[in-house]
Image (cartoon, rainbow, N blue to C red):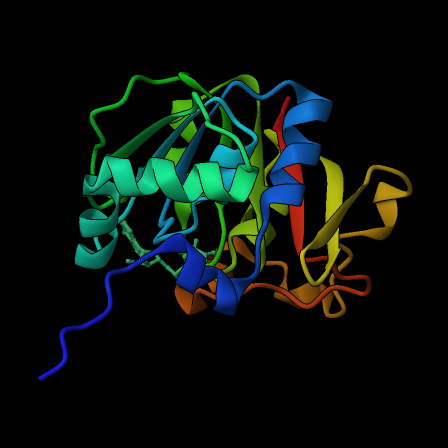
Amino acid sequence: MTPAPSPSWESYRTSIGDRSMMFAAIAETWHVENALYPGSYLDLSPSTAIPSVTYVDTDRRAARYFADSDFVRAELARAMRTESAARVDFLHADYTMSLPLADGAFDLLISLYAGPVWEHCRRHLRAHGLLLANTSHGDASLAALDPDVELVAAVHHRGDRYRLDARSLDGYLVPKKPAAADPDLIRRTGRGIAYTRSAFAYLFRLR
Ligand SMILES: C[S@@+](CC[C@H](N)C(=O)[O-])C[C@H]1O[C@@H](n2cnc3c(N)ncnc32)[C@H](O)[C@@H]1O
């Protein structure tokens, strides 16, 4: 039997694309030094732009991938066309349980297609820290209803080209059906709300 191919960011990118440009724009605009990425799987793109990233996942393939630090470093160097001094940490852990990380330690919390990261991991975000979330599992919709955060940008993309829109923010996160804007309903269904104007993801900042 042929052995399963080793997990790699390069192969994962063929399905999700390369989000490096998004993280470069976020890191440059908001001076992000470190980030926490619960439910990252093999998406190494934040490390192309952010000096220190802690990835968290329960998946065994993700654990196997991040355990091979030489391979991870080589993938980063190939993508960046230069050696990278970025710090890459991985926790093989369930983010809904207590993580061995300090409170208020991170500039950016990343929540993409991985469930209710915001409510479980928000304590790790520093004052005025950022949350990047999308609506797929309802996380951006929960954040949109949370008075502790404000929207600072919407993220759009075409292929691997990403753009942040920080203007006309009032036009985003307006539910098509106002009754859907119910945190308990979003938690129960694990699904985001449909908005009159949508984006790939939303960047929020703790007030
Ligand atoms: C659909 S993938 C998304 C991966 C990546 N964020 C992306 O955008 O491509 C969801 C990942 O979240 C992980 N995950 C889901 N719930 C988790 C939990 N409670 N703790 C840690 N990882 C979790 C899964 O193992 C999986 O690797």
Q: Which of the image's four quarters has the C terminus?
A: top right
User: Residue at horizontal 63%, vertical 64%?
Assistant: 193
Residue drawn at (42%, 62%), measured in percent from left and top?
12
Ligand 1 quadrant in view: bottom left
Quarter of the figure that contains the N terminus? bottom left
Q: Where residue 47 sits in the image (x, y, percent)?
A: 47, 34
Task: State the residue lying farthest toward the right.
Answer: 168
How far from the left and from the top, in percent, is residue 150?
A: 69, 33
Residue toward you, 11 or 146 = 11
Q: Is residue 18 left or right of residue 117?
A: right
Would residue 66 be seen by someone viewing this image from the given angle? yes
User: Residue at point 80% right, 52% down?
Assistant: 172
- Number of marks in picture: 0
Of residue 186 and residue 126, the one placed in the foreground of this image is 126
Res 120 visible: no
Q: Is residue 89 left or right of residue 12?
A: left
User: Is 15 left or right of 31, judged from the image as shown?
Assistant: left
23 lies left or right of 53: right
Farthest left residue in view: 1
Farthest bottom residue in view: 1
Residue 206 image-quadrant placement = top right
Q: In x, y percent, where is residue 21?
A: 66, 43
Q: 189 and 98: which one is in front?
A: 98
For residue 101, above or below residue 73: above
Locate residue 138, reporting x and y percent. Answer: 52, 58
Picture layout, residue 129 above or below residue 173: above
Q: Which sits in the foreground, 177 or 50? A: 50
